[in-house]
Image: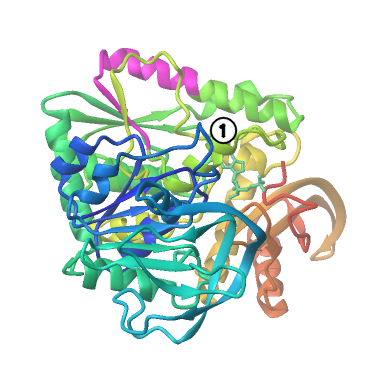
Amino acid sequence: MVIVLDFGGQYNQLIARRVRECNVYCEVHPYTLSIDKIKEMNPKGIILTGGPNSVYDEKSPHYDKELFELGIPVLGICYGSQLMAYTLGGKVEPAVVSEYGKTEVLIDKKDSNIFKDVEEKTICWMSHTDFISKAPEGFEVTTHTTSCPIAAMENVSKKLYAVQFHPEVVHSVEGTKMLRNFVIDVCGCSGDWKMDSFVETTIKNLREKIGDGKVLCALSGGVDSSVAAVLLSKAIGKQLTCVFVDQGLLRKNEGDEVEAVFGPKGPYELNFIRVNAQQRFYEKLKGVTEPEQKRKIIGEEFIRVFEEEAKKIGKVDYLVQGTIYPDVIESGLGKSAVIKSHHNVGGLPDYVDFKEIVEPLKMLFKDEVRKAGLELGIPEYLVFRQPFPGPGLGIRIIGEVTEEKVKIVQDADFIYREEIAKAGLDKKISQYYAALTNMRSVGVMGDGRTYDYAVALRAVITSDFMTAEAAPIPFEILSKVADRIVNEVKGVNRVLYDCTSKPPATVEME
Ligand code: XMP
């Protein structure tokens, strides 16, 4: 295992992810992790991340010098490299010219382990205002740039390496190669770790941690909570209870699909409770048209239902959440304006009686969670399910939500998804769905006049969902979807395609 010690930089989990891509298991821990704990964990290598501070600031995070004397290979990145230099007697200063962005790095020491098979001139991502102006004794300078005399340094006998740039960022063209050289050649990791090892180790750790405790999981049927639930079920079986609230705002057949996998007829041994709360949600949403109010009602009602179920179960020791790494970053940012009050189905009342929250996926990115899901044997249609908002179809029906409208949007959405999959576009589009507009218009069907709803189709391409482009779906496909929807779904006589990007629009309609 390799430990990444987090000094507060932006790309810290990305380092872990790159290391895992080299088939080496890696965990990120805060820089406050004690030296004793590190010794106990006995990693094959340690990577120190970047961070926003200057090493010479009094309040900046530091680490005991002993870290560099353990005989464990250490790679310092950006702030981590400066920290290594500073702690070991080198000099760090503010740079006259700060470097930011893609920068040409020249390799001075061609036989350096870290730069094996790397081009003599290689593009790396720089982002720093301080620089190492003097390497500590025993270190050799291995690379430079036009404005940074020590872009990398090493002390081979002590197995200490430092790079000023960020090899973990995609813009560092040969960055992954450098990280691989470190973890495989320098640290001696075997490079045979796979997602199934994550699954195995996590199950073992969960079993040890939970013992004979009781665990509760709010299951939404989304990929994250599903993978978390299956991990837990494999670890502790019937000690786990999953509560799945069908609020009547799910996609067509979704409730039954979730039940087929997690319910008593499914392959997992767990306690599964499906709460059919559809009517209760429709009742609360009657007459409500304002989007934020709808979101709040759905969120609150979910909590009420959940509380009632939790009370029946009684005291639980642990609560499972399917938090993944991007959720951790987003909640850390928490200062941006509220565009929409996001309701996460996993968002639970504060006072459910439990000892601790268990978040087995919080180190993983979405695609890694999906890989783990496949390893666990979860069906592909659940693993590759697109993101689906907690308030569900409630925010895909513009205006008042009624049972009749839910049925219309479910049927239209089902057809849309079916055609997109048939066209082989399902894995190319980040998110797509049909929504029911609040607009009715005149049409003609057979020989008669109709006055029915318009369905809007949405499809976006995005990597982070913060910004998104409308997907350029070929017209023939859109046209086929439109034909099928107006012919097969009663109450719809018009289909529109939403071509707006985010911003100024958002992915969802409300
Ligand atoms: P927006 O509409 O904000 O959507 O551009 C961005 C992404 O977030 C999802 N989304 C939600 N997810 N609870 C969730 O769990 C919510 O309340 C919620 N609202 C939007 C949306 O589906 C898209 O993937």
Residue 117 in sight in this render: yes
49 vs 37: above or below: below
Which quarter of the figure has residue 483? Answer: bottom right
- Residue under circle 1? 343
Residue 162 percent across, percent down from the top left: 39, 62
Q: Which residues are magenta?
A: 303-321
> Does residue 348 appear to the left or right of 159 in the view shown?
right
**Quadrant (top left, top right, bottom left, bottom right) of the C terminus:** top right
Which quarter of the figure has residue 355? Answer: top left
What residue occupies the far front of the structure in this picture?
A: 137
Nearer to us in this view, 272 or 187: 187
148 vs 457: above or below: below
**Quadrant (top left, top right, bottom left, bottom right) of the N terminus:** bottom left
Nearer to us in this view, 297 or 387: 387
Q: Secondary structure at mark 1?
A: loop
Residue 211 percent across, percent down from the top left: 11, 28
Q: How many marks?
A: 1
Which quarter of the figure has residue 315? Answer: top left
> Does residue 44 appear to the left or right of 305 in the view shown?
left
Q: Residue at x 16, y 31 (%)?
A: 209
Residue 268 in sight in this render: no
Q: Residue at x 76, y 29 (%)?
A: 290
> Does residue 225 appear to the left or right of 484 in the view shown?
left
Q: Residue at x 41, y 61 (%)?
A: 135
Residue 491 percent across, percent down from the top left: 72, 50
Q: Is mark 1 within 8 Å of ligand 1?
A: yes
Nearer to us in this view, 43 or 498: 43
Does the stretch in magenta take in 220?
no
Residue 233 percent across, percent down from the top left: 20, 40
What amino acid is found at the position of numbered circle 1 in the picture? His
28 vs 34: above or below: below
